[in-house]
Image (cartoon, helix red, strand yellow):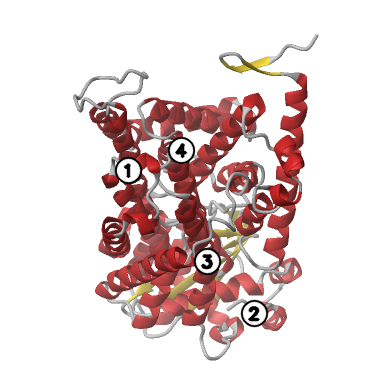
């Protein structure tokens, strides 16, 4: 006997509705994954193909070709529609959970004034440009019907929409450029972290402002008639939630993770624990009048701060969500919007100009203020410009709240995609060196330790620092202190059995590399869980960012071939090791 699933008062999901639901999901996920993989093969973000899948299956294409098929597979009313929308909302919340896990507030604040300057100027300048444009021409900028009586919410939204960053997209770009573990990469990630946290907090307050319209009397009450707290109570509860989750809540989660890992199977136990916390926080923020995704994001920030959440576990969560829920969400964007009829070239151009010039110039000025060169500051600016998924999610939420028109929604999506596409190539161009350096040319016999005695991270760094100090005639304690401090900020295991502890020193004028080979491996907390058998200590001049980036690239590309890595482990002498590196350098692909 079939038991219908009741979704709303008087509405049930009958067997025919279940059939359509699963068909919709199969078609949407299948095409989104296919086009996402094609986009990756073409060296483009997978989100581009996933959104294209929704455009092809939505009003833009499929509805024009066969309205009846579109209406059958993707109904706009009824129980199946409600079920699909619920799944899409869940997907958005889980996406923000992943973004939150990428946030490392401790590392961000360890960067000090550099991260704060880049982040705040990169946020304030485009925000002000967006606010001025929205206030000056709300009709042209695409104010929605839901914001006609609340222009402040619309104005603030436009400011945030053109100033938010896409932390996951930025991380992916830095990884592709072999820059993620560099000091510049960490600066960009730290600044993007602060930018995103501030941006989502402001957006939470924008959503709270929208509830004032539901209380036409203007009297602050504990809750409104629909059970949602008033705007005053929403803001109060949001602040309490934030303070709790980023202080005591963060501590409790940190202490709970070892217990979960010790008494549950991996990775299911930890994965379930993370999802339960995220969904619980999402439910709470939805109830207080702020969107559920904000709760999931803050839950991710709180859990991501724990050192007990290993890189391998983070990667498992990331793969689970980004390969199933992310394609569903991004494909769903195109299901309800006609991208052709809502395409406004003038509005798109204005949004692009505000977002690109504001973000790049703001971050450029912040980086220059901290003493970086013009070329490096420009690279930081373009590195922070990618908006990707975060801009798209913001636009989707604002459209659902009737805060913006379809035209502005389409402009935000195009802006988010284009900034993500341009960011990586521009960084490549700005940081490219005129000649290719070979890793083996930087080494001599003294710069190898064929068998490290160390079994832990601290001991390995100390042993390599001692050898570097002997070559450079510097204080080994000073080198060790600088490298250990950098390691505490972000682990330098890059996977594939490699680790790259590093530091920038004022005492040296040119780069120095010391390589240690560990017989049993040292745990540098790499994303793939492998211990590091080859450990590269990189020391570069403090005023030279690009040398460090180039060395990281050389190591990553040289050992991208597993055969080269194995030959390096098997080398019987430093001469053989140098020979392996030189062959590996010649065979490695050129990325930058």
The residue nearer to you, when weighing 109 against 559, is 109
Tell me the tag on residue 590: 2
Q: What residue is at 54 percent from the left and 75 percent from the top?
A: 425
Sequence-wise, the earlier of marks 1 and 3 is 1
The furthest residue to the left? 219
Residue 509 screen position, x and y as percent: 37, 85
* Residue 180 in view, yes or no: no
From the image, tell me which residue sits under label 3: 418
Which residue carries the number 1 mark? 148
Question: Mark 2 or mark 4, which has the lower sequence index?
Answer: 4
Q: In the depicted view, which residue is nearer to us: 48 or 535?
A: 48
**Which secondary structure, mark 4?**
helix
Image quarter for residue 294? Answer: top left
**Mark 1 and mark 4 in contact (Cβ < 8 Å)?**
no
Question: Element at badge 1?
Answer: loop
Secondary element at image label 3 = helix
Viewed as shown, does residue 82 lie left or right of 544?
Answer: right
- 3D distance between C-alphas at marks 2 and 1: 53 Å
Name the disc covering residue 293, or none. 4
């Amino acid at each position: 006997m079939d038991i219908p699933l009741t979704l709303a008062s008087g509405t049930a999901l009958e067997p025919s509705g279940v059939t359509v639901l699963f068909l919709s999901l199969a078609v949407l996920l299948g095409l989104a994954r296919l086009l996402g993989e094609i986009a990756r093969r073409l060296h483009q973000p997978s989100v581009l193909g996933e959104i294209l899948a929704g455009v092809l299956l939505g009003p833009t294409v499929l509805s024009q070709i066969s309205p009846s098929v579109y209406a059958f597979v993707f109904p706009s009313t009824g129980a199946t529609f409600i079920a699909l929308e619920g799944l899409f909302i869940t997907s958005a919340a889980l996406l923000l959970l992943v973004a939150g896990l990428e946030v490392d507030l401790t590392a961000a604040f360890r960067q000090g004034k550099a991260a704060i300057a880049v982040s705040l100027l990169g946020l304030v300048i485009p925000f002000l440009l967006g606010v001025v444009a929205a206030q000056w021409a709300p009709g042209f900028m695409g104010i929605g019907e839901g914001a006609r009586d609340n222009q402040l919410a619309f104005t603030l939204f436009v400011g945030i929409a053109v100033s938010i960053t896409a932390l996951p997209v930025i991380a992916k770009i830095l990884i592709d450029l072999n820059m993620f573990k560099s000091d510049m990469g960490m600066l960009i990630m730290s600044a993007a972290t602060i930018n995103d946290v501030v941006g989502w907090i402001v957006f939470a307050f924008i959503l709270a402002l929208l509830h004032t319209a539901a209380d036409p009397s203007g009297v602050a009450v504990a809750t409104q008639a629909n059970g949602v707290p008033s705007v005053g109570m929403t803001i109060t509860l949001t602040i309490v939630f934030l303070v709790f989750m980023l202080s005591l809540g963060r501590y409790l989660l940190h202490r709970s993770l070892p217990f979960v890992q010790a008494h549950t199977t991996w990775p299911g136990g930890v994965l379930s624990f993370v999802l339960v916390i995220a969904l619980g926080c999402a439910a709470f923020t939805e109830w207080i009048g702020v969107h559920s995704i904000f709760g999931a994001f803050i839950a991710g920030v709180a859990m991501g701060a724990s050192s007990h959440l290993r890189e391998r576990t983070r990667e498992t969560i990331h793969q689970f969500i980004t390969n199933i829920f992310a394609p569903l969400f991004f494909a769903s964007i195109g299901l309800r919007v006609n991208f052709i009829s809502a395409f406004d070239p003038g509005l798109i151009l204005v949004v692009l100009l505000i977002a690109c010039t504001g973000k790049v110039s703001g971050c450029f000025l912040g980086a220059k203020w901290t003493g970086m060169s013009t070329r490096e500051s420009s690279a930081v600016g373009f590195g922070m410009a990618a908006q990707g998924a975060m801009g798209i999610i913001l636009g989707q939420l604002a459209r659902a709240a009737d805060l913006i028109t379809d035209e502005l929604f389409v402009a935000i999506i195009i802006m988010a995609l284009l900034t993500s596409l341009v960011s990586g190539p521009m960084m490549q161009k700005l940081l490219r060196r005129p000649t290719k350096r070979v890793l083996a040319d930087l080494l001599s016999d003294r710069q190898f330790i064929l068998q490290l005695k160390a079994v832990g991270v601290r001991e390995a760094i100390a042993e390599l620092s001692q050898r570097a100090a002997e070559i450079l005639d510097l204080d080994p304690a000073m080198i060790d202190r600088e490298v250990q401090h950098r390691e505490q900020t972000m682990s330098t295991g890059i996977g594939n059995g490699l680790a790259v502890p590093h530091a920038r020193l004022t005492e040296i004028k040119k780069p120095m590399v010391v390589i240690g080979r560990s017989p049993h491996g040292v745990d540098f907390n790499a994303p793939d869980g492998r211990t590091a058998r080859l450990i590269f200590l990189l020391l570069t001049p403090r005023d030279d960012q690009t040398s460090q980036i180039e060395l990281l690239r050389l190591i990553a590309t040289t050992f991208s071939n597993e055969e080269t890595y194995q030959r390096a482990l098997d080398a019987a002498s430093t001469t053989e090791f140098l020979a392996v590196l030189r062959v590996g350098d010649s065979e490695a692909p050129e990325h930058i």
